[in-house]
Amino acid sequence: MASNQTAYEAEKAPIAPPNLHDRKASYSCLSGLEEEAGTDEPKFRRGTSYSRIRHLDGLDYHSKNLDVPVVVVASEVEPWSKSGGLAIVAAAYGYEFAMRGHRTMVVSPMYDDYPGASWVADKDIFFFGSNHRVKYFHQRKEHSKQAGGPATDYIFVYLECFRRGGGLYHDENGEYGDNLFRFGLFALAALEAPLVCSIGGSTYGDKVLFMANDWQAGLVPVMLTHKFRAHGTYRDARCIFVVHNMGYQGAYPWTGTELENLTLPGEAHDNVFFVYPEHMRAWELDKGECINLTKGALITCDRVLTVSQNYAWEICTDEGGYLLQQCCRDKGIYLAGIQNGIDDTWDPRVDPDIAANFSPEDLSGKAACKKFLQKSLGLNEDENVALIGFVGRLTTQKGVDILQDGVVEWMLKDEGNGVTGRVQVILMGNGDKHLSEWLQAIEAQHKGRVCGYAGFDPKVERHMMAGCDFLLMPSRYEPCGIPQMVALTYGTVPVVHATGGLKDSVKDARSHDPAVTKEANGYYVSPLYPDKMKEVLWVALETYHKNRSEHLRLMKNGMSCDFYWPRAVQEYEKHIDYTLSDPPLYR
């Protein structure tokens, strides 16, 4: 991008894929806001809160394959390891599939000593030219007090290469240089886990459904196809590959020894080999050759799922496929999207951690939540202003620069029109230093009207969801998005860029389609420019101040939506049944 081109002007051009030939591009981009912190004892978020209330209304699908275990393979799982959203989703899979009646295993690396996890098996694996002793540790989480009730088996793969002091995928010097080895061996170890880990007197066996998540587990379907199924093992097993973010693919320079190191046959070459176009190569003699784990997964898996329906469409486009769009298109009917869910603890009717409970039938508690939020963050206590929030990483991907480029100042300026100037703004997040400094500066300039929270506090986030009138999500891309679903559930109207999962959950009040406006619960910004953001915010704020009945309608529409995990997992079960009913897709 030219130096005089702003980030939002670049939105007019096709999205430039990250330089995947650069190893730094292999990170999980699902970095969360919370700092990684060790704990003596994992705290399960799905404990008593889940037994108190389950959102099961309207669920009518019955799995045809409850006898087939589900094996979730993920590089992180909450509460043991977390860099962001992948850990939350993996934990949700583990819980929800078990609650639906499936025997459920979650396989993840053992980055640290996990209290309560006990050794269950060893396996010697030849990999990268030598033997490696893989140790498996097990912890069982019961989800019911009744004997034989739903439970999840967590299997942790112990390898020395995962025991290091930095982050899960990188440290201050960048991505770990041995990540291909680390996650390649992890994938192979995960495939062995159902065969070698005896739990409760039996192994899971070789008729299972693997759910491999993102590039870190990308070699699971490749190895399943070329190493196991080709030799008579896992003939009845199938693998679904879940794409959480196509922009991060696990691509590493090709040296010619990759197949041998990974113990893959020559037939796997075309599945994993990738060549970058000339304009993306690093130097004159660079051939652009690499091994691409996501490409291999897309080709060899039995089905591809993304974390929202719209994102399934986006990864088939030249802009959203990041050079793998043809692989995605080739999956045809074997590609679909399912919006991630939110857990049952997000419910304003019973939430014990907000100032007052409320519902669509009685919204008085939301006013109390707004007053509490204003007071706790040092804002003027004024029920007549529109309270607008943003919570997310402070990066251009999240569109914070759009807000910085005059949008917030415009909202705060009173021009006597009865719309602008009647707002307060809360901005919270970690991220780029210059954006953190902007948060602090704009709060100093507008004391009592702006809170710039350069950090993250989950308690404050929960109070924002309950107390704000609007939530801003100007993300440049958002495969799924969780905050907008929580905001809708709490009657906080989202203003979002029309992209990814945001389009699936938010219905635009400015749509020309009467069917959409009838169900409207928020506002779209498209294309994503500061002036367009102002235009949409003007409509939203004018509606809030001058047509309160319409604003209340949007709130109640949002609160009537069901974004909880049981409904999402029911959709997963349908695709599991579709997948198990077919022969292996890649033969």
Image (tube, helix red, strand yellow):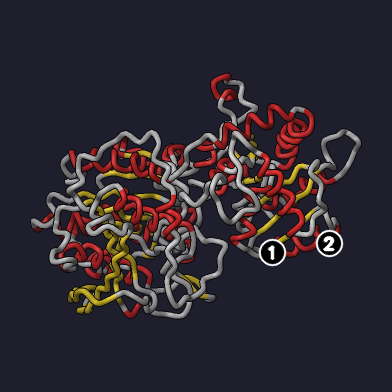
Mark earlier in primary sequence (1, 2): 2
Residue at the image point whose x is 81% and y is 51% from the top: 381
Query: Dot 2: few (<14), some (14–19), or many (≥20) neighbours within 10 Å?
Result: some
- The residue to which callout 2 is attached is 444
Badge 1 element: loop
User: Where does the image place residue 130, in percent across and percent down from the top left?
Assistant: 21, 79
Q: CA distance from mark 1 to mark 2?
A: 13 Å
Residue 307 is at least partly visible in this image: no
Residue 102 is tagged as none
User: Where does the image place residue 501, in percent across and percent down from the top left?
Assistant: 50, 42
411 up-or-down from 252: above or below:
above
Badge 2 element: helix
Residue 505 is at least partly visible in this image: yes
User: Where does the image place residue 226, in percent across and percent down from the top left?
Assistant: 18, 57
482 up-or-down from 284: above or below:
above
Please state which of residues 120 and 188 is positioned toward the viewer in this rendering: 120
Residue 454 is tagged as 1
Q: Looking at the rendering, which quadrant does residue 55 occupy? A: top left
Q: Looking at the rendering, which quadrant does residue 339 occupy? A: top left
Q: What amino acid is found at the position of numbered circle 2 in the picture?
A: Ala
Q: What amino acid is found at the position of numbered circle 1 in the picture?
A: Ala
52 up-or-down from 194: above or below:
above
Please state which of residues 565 and 55 is positioned toward the viewer in this rendering: 55
